[in-house]
Image: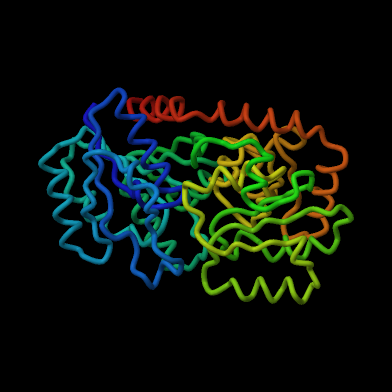
Amino acid sequence: MKLAVVGPVYPYRAGIAYCTTRLAEELAKSHDVAIHSFSRQFPRLFYPGGDDRDPTLEPKTPRGARFAIDVVNPFTWIREGLRLRRERPDAVIFTWWVWVWAMPYLVMRALLPATTRVVYQCHNITDKEPSSWKSWLTTRALASADLLVIHAKSEADEARRRLGDRATPRIEEIFLPVHEMGNEVPPREAARRALGIDGSRPVALFFGHVRPFKALDVVLDAWPLLVSDVLLLVAGEAWYGGEEGYREQAKRLGLDPRRVRFDFRFIPDSEIATWFAAADVVLAPYRHEAQSGVVLTSFHFGRPVIATRVGGMPEIVENGANGLLIETESPAALAAGLERFFSSCDRGAMERAAAAAARRYSWHEFAARLMQALHS
C-alpha cells in the first residue's frame, strides 16, 4: 500500500517520536511509506521542558522525512494537506498524543481525497493535565478518523464514551510495542561504575519526564518508610518548575543524599541504557496513564516494574511475574512493594519475564495487526 505517516520522528526526543519512527520503519518493510513530521511541535508556552530535539538521534533520522508542519502556522497545515492530496496515499496514519495537534490534523484531514483512509494511532485519549476545551479539541480530531488504534482498554472505553453511537471511527485495541530505546546494554556492574554506584546496593529507578501525574512526590514520601537501604535514582527533566519542589520535599523528609540521587535533566538516547542497566527495578507509581513507554523500555532492558493499577498498566505488568502492582497514591503500598521485591521475589525470574514481555510486544506484530485492522 501507499501510506503516509504524520507525526514527530527522530531527532525529536522521547517516546512518541521513537514510536512514530519505529512504526514508519516497520511499515516500510512491506509498503511505500512517506513521513510528514513537524518543523515545530509545540508553542514554547505548552512545552515547559528544554529543547525538544536530541542531537544524539540525528544519525537515526528517517531518510526522506519532511519536517514541514509548524503547529502555529496554518499555512504549513494547508501546504502539507495539499501535498498529501496530490500524493493520494491509500491511508494516512496520524500519531495522536496531545490536543495541540488537533487543528493541524483537522485541516490536513479535510484536504485528503475521499478515497484515503484516516487512522489515528492514539497514545492518549485523555490529556495528562485535562480541561474541557482540550477534551473538546481532542474529541473533534478523533471523530474525523476512519479508524482509531488505541493501546489500552480503559482508553478505548473513554473513546467510545466520547464518540457515542457514531458509525465511525472504528476502534481497535492493539498493544503499545516495546520501546527499544538506547544503545547496546552494558553489564549491570559496568553501568553502576559509570554512574558511581556501589555494585552490590539495591537500586530503584524513576525515569523520564517528571510531571505531576507520575507521582514522584509519592515516591519520595515512601522512602522514609523503607527498612532496606535502597538507592533511588531520579533521572529525567522536571516540567512546570517542579525541580525545586522535589528537592525541598526530600530535604523536609530528611532524605539522605546517599539514598536519593536526583539528575533533573533530559537523558539523551545515548545514556538511556546505562540508567536502566544499573537499576534492579523501575518505578511507575502513576496517578493515571494510558500505557507507559517507561514500562515498555524497562522490559526491553529486562527490568521488572513496580506500577500502580491505573489505565493500561495491569494489561502489561503481570503482578508477581514481570513486576508488582500496587494501589495508587499510597507511599506505604510502594514501600511495601519495594520491600517485597528485594526480600522475597525471585528477581532473576522477574527479569526473564520482563524480557519475555518485550519480545511479546514486538513492532512486527503491532504493524501486522494495524494493517489487518486497516484492511478489515
Residue at horizontal 62 percent and vertical 26 percent from the top: 356
Q: Quadrant of residue 72?
A: bottom left
| Residue 162 x, y percent position in the rendering | 46, 53
Q: 96 above or below 33?
A: below
| Residue 88 x, y percent position in the rendering | 15, 37
Residue at horizontal 87 percent and vertical 42 percent from the top: 343
Q: Quadrant of residue 137?
A: bottom left
Tally of numbered discs: 0
| Residue 325 x, y percent position in the rendering | 74, 44
Can the viewer see residue 118? no
Q: Residue furthest top?
A: 30
Q: Nearer the viewer, residue 27 or 185?
A: 185
Can the viewer see residue 367? yes
Q: 297 above or below 102?
A: above
| Residue 349 x, y percent position in the rendering | 75, 28
Q: Quadrant of residue 60?
A: top left
Q: Nearer the viewer, residue 288 or 360?
A: 360
Point out the image quarter for the C terminus. top left
In this picture, residue 303 sits left or right of residue 341: left
Q: Nearer the viewer, residue 208 or 90?
A: 208
Residue at horizontal 21 percent and vertical 30 percent from the top: 2
